[in-house]
Image (cartoon, helix red, strand yellow):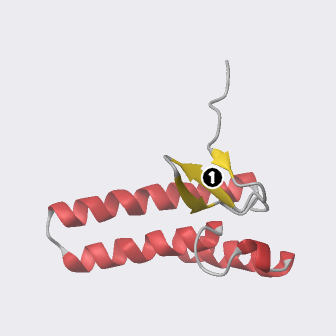
Amino acid sequence: MTSKPGPDTTADGHHVIVHGRRWRATDPAVPADVGERLRGHLMAARRAVAAARRHEDSRAERAARDRVQTAKVALGERGVPWWEQSADERRTRWTRGLHALDT
């Protein structure tokens, strides 16, 4: 069984390149189990955005988009760049994000 190759990255590892577009990479310090949980929350929130849009429910869409933002920040893909944060700041970022999404 072979694993699927990941996207290309910039030389510094700060960004991934997808279809010629540069996106901030997930913080590599996020523990695998935490990253898996955060990505699960992210995908659920994205599905909730789509469902809210189908039902033209602007309040539900706003709540779902807020959860997407929380997950993306916790993963280090938005907010203060993870490479500019200390190890403690990075750990606090993903811990707070996960706590917010788990509740």
Q: Residue at x 64, y 40 (%)?
A: 6
* Residue kind at label 1, given as amino acid type: Glu
Q: Position of residue 75 (x, y in %)?
A: 63, 66
Q: Which residue is mark 1?
A: 36
- Residue 47 against residue 65 in the figure, above or below: above
Q: Position of residue 88 (x, y in %)?
A: 84, 79
Number of marks: 1
Res 61 quadrant in image: bottom left
Q: Position of residue 27 (x, y in %)?
A: 72, 63
- Residue 17 against residue 12 in the figure, above or below: above
Could you tell me which quadrant the N terminus lies in? top right
Say left or right for 23 vs 8.
Answer: left
Say left or right for 71 vs 65.
Answer: right
- Residue 89 against residue 32 in the figure, above or below: below
Please indicate, yes or no, whether residue 91 appears anywhere in the rendered image. no
Q: Residues within 10 Å of mark 1 (few under 14, many from 20)?
A: few
For the residue pair 85 and 9, the one nearer the viewer reads as 9
Q: Residue furthest right?
A: 87
Please indicate, yes or no, whether residue 33 appears anywhere in the rendered image. yes
Res 46 quadrant in image: bottom left
Res 86 quadrant in image: bottom right
Q: Position of residue 87 (x, y in %)?
A: 85, 75
Say left or right for 54 vs 77.
Answer: left
Q: Residue at x 70, y 53 (%)?
A: 33
Say which element carries label 1: helix
